[in-house]
Amino acid sequence: MNTVPKSAPGTAPGPAPTLSVVVCSYTLDRWDDLCAALDSIRAQRRPPDETVVVVDHCPALTARLADRPGLRLVESPERPGVSGARNTGVTLARGEVVAFLDDDAVAEPDWTQRLLAGYRDPRVLGVGGRVDSWWETGRPGWFPPEYDWVVGCSYPGAPETTGAVRNFIGANMSFRRAAVVAAGGFRSDLGRIGTSPFGCEETELCLRLTAGHPGSELRYEPAAVVRQHVPRARTTWRYFSSRCYAEGRSKAVVARYAGTRSALSSERRYVRRTLPAAVLRALGRRRVRAAGALGAGACLAAAGYATGRLARADAAVTTTAPAVEPGVAAVPTRSRP
């Protein structure tokens, strides 16, 4: 695995770096959400230097986006999945910083400003922000806020103030491009493929970046806010349970690469402090279903983790190297003024 030269993670304090925003999408089913995401990027008070839209193996989506102005439209040549699509965006981005916005999230107008401000500190390798949830049909009464990570959002127990963190939420994160490329990008054996509930590719990359650069920092900036759309399909018990189990399986894969201590440092605090307090609050308010969901989610995640740890490594995941390497030739792109 490649390493970044000591001078690569940052520069001397000075003007904010150039910025590429990457949005990855794989389906026409999110067309309205994607348009809203792109409109929010165009409305930024500090416009990005470019917006790269990576289409993950969906020719119909590419065709519909072809006439939309102000984009670099790219078809991912990597294996299907969010990791390959993000790696395509990193490879092709021209900005010194690459920010990722989900195709079903909308950024606040000062989002880019808030992210870029953190990079004036040369120790900072990445900056991530808060992800608020927008429930299309309302939050189910049994769905506890402590499990908003299930729908890709910030949650009680996560950091709330500006400071160093272990990892970011994928819907709202940014990195120094040179550091990500030199580190090898997102692992191709982690991350969602279509609607699959697996993930943790951003956690593994964050751990790899900080481990390779002692003294560096991934900074959480709660003022950099995006709003994540939570559709009806993600409000069911079936989705909740599958995501909890898949999160455990995914964390088991991360532990193989980064070690158990690093992979589960935040989770231990969450299980020991956040969840017990939440269960007591729910029971005190006679919200029995919410208390049950809190306990069941933890058990499902633990079961997924145990299953993942017991599974044979060659059966559970591939051992391919990350897909992005320095000097990878850019795939053909379509640019729009």
Image: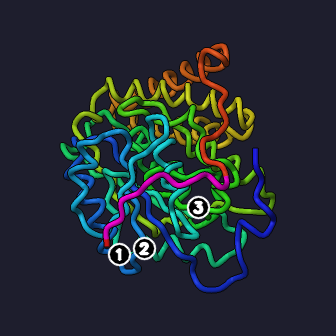
Q: Which residue is found at the position 53% from the left and 74% from the top? A: 116
| Circle 1 Cα neighbour tier, 10 Å, few/some/many (<14 / 14–19 / ≥20) | some
Please tell me which residue lies in front, 252 or 137: 252
Q: Is residue 184 located in the magenta-colored stretch of the structure?
A: no
Q: Which residue is found at the position 67% from the left and 59% from the top? A: 179
Q: Quadrant of residue 230?
A: top left
Please tell me which residue lies in front, 317 or 336: 336
Residue at the outermost bottom position: 14
Tell me which amino acid carries mark 1: Gln
245 on left or right of 138: right
x and y percentages locating residue 118 in the rendered image: 59, 73
**Structural distance between the alpha carbons of marks 2 and 3:** 14 Å
Please tell me which residue lies in front, 157 or 38: 38
Colour scheme: rainbow
| Circle 3 Cα neighbour tier, 10 Å, few/some/many (<14 / 14–19 / ≥20) | many
281 on left or right of 163: left
Which secondary structure, mark 3? strand
Cβ–Cβ below 8 Å for labels 2 and 1? yes
Q: Which residue is mark 2?
A: 48
Res. 175 mark: 3
Q: State which tag comes first along the sequence, 3 or 1.
A: 1
Cβ–Cβ below 8 Å for labels 3 and 1? no
Q: State which tag comes first along the sequence, 2 or 3.
A: 2
Please tell me which residue lies in front, 127 or 238: 127
| Circle 2 Cα neighbour tier, 10 Å, few/some/many (<14 / 14–19 / ≥20) | some
Q: Which residue is mark 1?
A: 44
Cβ–Cβ below 8 Å for labels 2 and 3? no
x and y percentages locating residue 306 in the rendered image: 61, 18
Q: Quadrant of the C terminus?
A: bottom left
Which secondary structure, mark 1? loop
Which secondary structure, mark 2? loop
Q: Which residues are magenta?
A: 326-336
